[in-house]
Image (tube, coloured by chain):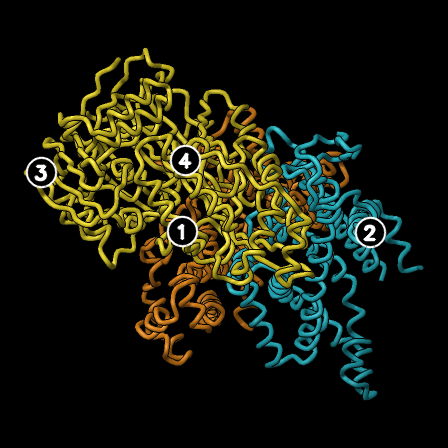
Chain colours: A yellow, B cyan, C orange
Amino acid sequence: MTEYKTLSGAPLHPEAEALTTRLARGEIDRRGFLRAMAWLGVAVGSASAFGGKAFAEETPKDGGTLRFACQIQEITDPMMTNWIEASNLFRNSLEFLTYVDENNITHPYLAKSWTPSADLTVWDFELDERAKWSNGDAFQPEDVIFNIERWIAPDSQSSNKTAFGAISRVEKTGDHSVRITLSRPMASLPEQLYSYTCPIVHRGFKGNWPAEPVGTGPFALVSHEVGRQSVFQKRPDYWGTHARLDEIQYIDLGPDVTTHLAALSSGQVDVIYRATIAEYDLMKSLPNIQILSAKGANTIVLRMQVDQKPFDDIRVRQAVVLAANNQQMLDVAYRGRGDLGANYHVSPTQADYFSLPATPRDVEKAKALLAEAGHADGVDIELTLGNTQGKWEQDTAQVLQQNLAEAGIRLKLNVLPASQYWPIWNKVPFGLTFWAHRPLGTMTLDLAYRSGGSWNESRFASPEFDAALDKAMAVVDPEARKIAMQEVERILQDNAVMVQPFWPERLSAAAEKVRGFVLHPSDYFRMDSVWIA
Amino acid sequence: MKLIVPYLTKPLVLTGGALAFGWLLVAVLAPLIAPYDPLQTLQPLAKPMAHGAKGEFFLLGTDMLGRDIFSRLVWGARTVVIYATLATLTAYAFGLLFGLIAGYAGGRTDAVLSFLANVVLSFPVLVLYIVIIVVIGASPVNIVIAVTFSSAPAIFRIVRGITIDVASRDFVKAAITQGESTLRILFVDILPNTTGPLAVDFCLRLGYTAITIGTLGFLGLGLPPPTPDWGGMVNEGRAMAIAFPHLVIFPCIAISSLTLGLSLLADGLREVNDAKERQA
Amino acid sequence: MYLGMFLLRKLAIALATMLVVSFLIFLALEVNVEDVAVKVLGQYSTVEQRAAWLAQNGYNDPFALRYIRWLGHFVAGDWGMSTFFRAPVVEIVMPRLAASAILAGGALLVIVVFGLGLGVLAGMRPGSLLDRVISVFSVVTTSIPDFASAVFLSGIFVFWLGLLPGASTMISGLSLAELILPVSVLGLYSMGYLARVTRASMVDVMNTHYIRTARLKGAGMGRIVLRHALRNALITPVTVIMLQLPWLLSGVIVVEVFYAYKGFGTLLYDAALNQDIYLIEACAMISVLVVVLSQILSDLIYGWLNPRIALVGAKA
């Protein structure tokens, strides 16, 4: 049996011993075991443990320019980012304390090791002493403290404020070490630190990054023009393993994926950010491209604000959920390419998923509930959506429109352009919002449904739910965590906060010559190991 | 009868008329012609001439959401024909009224009205629509308003020109000396003389308006979903057009055949008008 | 001298038009200050935020004063900040305008060459087979909306044959290959109309007395057309070309959006989708300005081709 060592050389955490024993007994699976071990600061090696990609035998080549089709949005303050596209631009020049790979395993990054206390409330991070800022400054504990304090400051508008609400103190404990103290145990802290709002900026950061693009990362920002293009160049003085590519050009090709594929097929770009189900047949017909696909915990949530009329009456929400036909939405709007959702926003791909069955569709019961709630003649509601991931969002809504009509619910669709949806996503009474993948169900639920959370778009507030979530978040053992999640999922499902119809398969495409580009489940694309054959 | 016969002998008029009136008929009779509810999900992505699992027959196939394309085209005809016609007619009401006034009154009234018409005409049509839609939003009524606003000045110019011409003729002068009311002169003596050129313009304008409504739908600025709308159908189907060409070919044929019919009709009418003028 | 007077008069009218247009645009977009605040600060900004912003930016002044101030700024080249692009509007608009000029110029070239060419060919021998083929072609192409031909041309040349680039961003400089599809789409839609006008004009000229005389004298067809007919036959079509510009501008929006061409059309489209009010104002003003200038140009060309008209115009 493999001997496990911590990254820091400290003795193994007591939980790590327990996990090893349980793995040996076959009570937990290897993947869940490895990710939990990584949280505890144990060195788990690279992801290739799960079988490497094709092309593994090729020798990577240096040089070349990669052209990446994606929307070029405004980038200012990394912690305020709410588009993953924008975060991927930061990712070239700014780094994180930890790195979570495509298998959800956490690895060292700016922090070379971390050691949690036995009760998981005190975390010691050892920073990589080689790390350097592009302006020549050394990377120091002060940088980390500066960032975390900004995130959780009382006037912080960042979603990090909720995600790291448990942090009570952050302090320097040595030339290269930082201690984070939590008010409640949080097993997955290292994993959370790779959230897309967590790039570490320089301690002198003034709020608008492109104005002073200082970073520790492998690329430097050359130019950034909203709606047009963004260019990064390889930094010869980078502190770590150098990137392969000389230059990356992000090109804005407008909102239409067909145009992106046209550009890919005619060799004008090398990678596209995302394709949707509508383009699937088109992609299959194109020679010279590789189709990338993966399953993850990304989904759309049609959530109702529980404090807005008519959704403040739980019977109306229940009626909506009961009348919705999740299977039909998946089959028609996404052509069956995905997994069915059961309206509690935890995915079978997430390690802490407890398989709570869906409530069966019941139109008659929905009608009865509506009548009870005083809407015997049906009810008029409006769903706002922005097709932020493609037209399938609208297709899903149109299927729902038909489903609800059967129960006498007249659904009006208010379709906005994507860029118009994000400014109001958490403000509309009934909205269709895309939620990105997160390695753990608790990470999503903590952001989206905890009482008063900054990204709590449904305004769901339940002390019972918060307590159950706290309990689940403190558990390291994967199996025990699942059990704790049952209660969390049940509360959410019972309260009929949302219709969460399905988990769509993620699709993208790249030119054949592109190597090392991995469809990270969160769409967090690190470009330093990408190369061109 | 004598008035209509020369039109009916022209093949251009016949072909164009058949296409245009065919679509008009389809629009009016949509509920009778369409086999299915245009919004109902039946079976996704059936090919043309395919039979559904429940014995349905999809003449032109179904779209991604499983809605019958033939039914959507038929109901879409209603959207285009009704809104384009309604919009063009409203534009005519305004264009005629102000054109007659300007042409007949002349002087300062004419100068001011003509100047204003020129002002509106100097907006590129789509730019004008976009500004109007940004200000008041996209809805059927607002599209009618936008079309009216942008078309009326052009109609105004035609009517004004003819009115000036006709007003100088002897029979109008005679009517004035006989003390006929201005209203009567405008609508009984002058208006009928404008019908020839206006009929031609009407057909062309209707075609342009249909295309513009389609374009707005294509750009996602048109009628909100799920209203069947030809331009919107092309837009929705184009990502899948390589694998499922029927998604875009049929709506394109629909919009092109309507416009083609209208321009053929306009050409034919013009030829007949010209011939009449030569005879006179 | 006449020309000077003529130009002066036209410019005065153009100026007056622009003045009214600017007022209309300002009226439409900024008469409701609450709306302006919503568009700039977002739909869910708080009432206090909006009130503060309005006060800070002089929106509590009377409408007339605001208009005059806005016009003053506009003339001085201060077009405000784009809420979507976060940059001064004037800096965004100018390069985009240049890009669209290239696209529209290319399209105009295609339209002129093919439209005039086909029209002259058809009008030389009215009723001939060539005439009929060209007439059918021009009627059919004008009936196909540009978005439809864009879908089909891309399907054929990009996805099926793989011959042409599918996006026309021009990110890495001017690329002729990237211009082919957008220019073809624009040309295809507009050349038919010009061809029909040219044909009609040509038929009229060919029927005139002096051409018939020339033909009776036994002069060759090519010689007749080049020597005698063309100059007279082209007066109307050339005027029409300039008047087509507003239509071309509309087409440019569709084509640019379709091919992700970073020009004026996509800019206006993005501005509309994002309720970018100051950018819309500037784009609308500029489109009108382009049209008004093209009308003056059209009058000038007309006068140059047909000197008698210019005299009349100047006297009036």
- Alpha carbon distance from label 1 to label 2: 58 Å
Q: Which mark is residue A464?
A: 1
Mark 4 crowdedness (10 Å alpha carbons): few <14, some 14-19, many ≥20: some
Q: Are marks 1 and 2 in contact (CB under 8 Å)?
A: no
> Is any part of residue A219 visible from this angle?
yes
In front: A312, or A380?
A312
Q: Residue at x 9, y 36 (%)?
A: A176
Residues indicated by labels 3 and 4 sit on the same polypeptide chain: yes
Q: Are marks 2 and 3 in contact (CB under 8 Å)?
A: no
Q: On the image, numbered disc 4 is attached to which residue?
A: A483
Q: On the image, numbered disc 2 is attached to which residue?
A: B29
Residues indicated by labels 3 and 1 sit on the same polypeptide chain: yes
Of the residues tagged 3 and 4, which is closer to the observer? 4
In front: A308, or A3?
A3
- Alpha carbon distance from label 4 to label 2: 61 Å
**Type of amino acid under label 2:** Leu
Report the residue that reaches farthest toward the top: A57
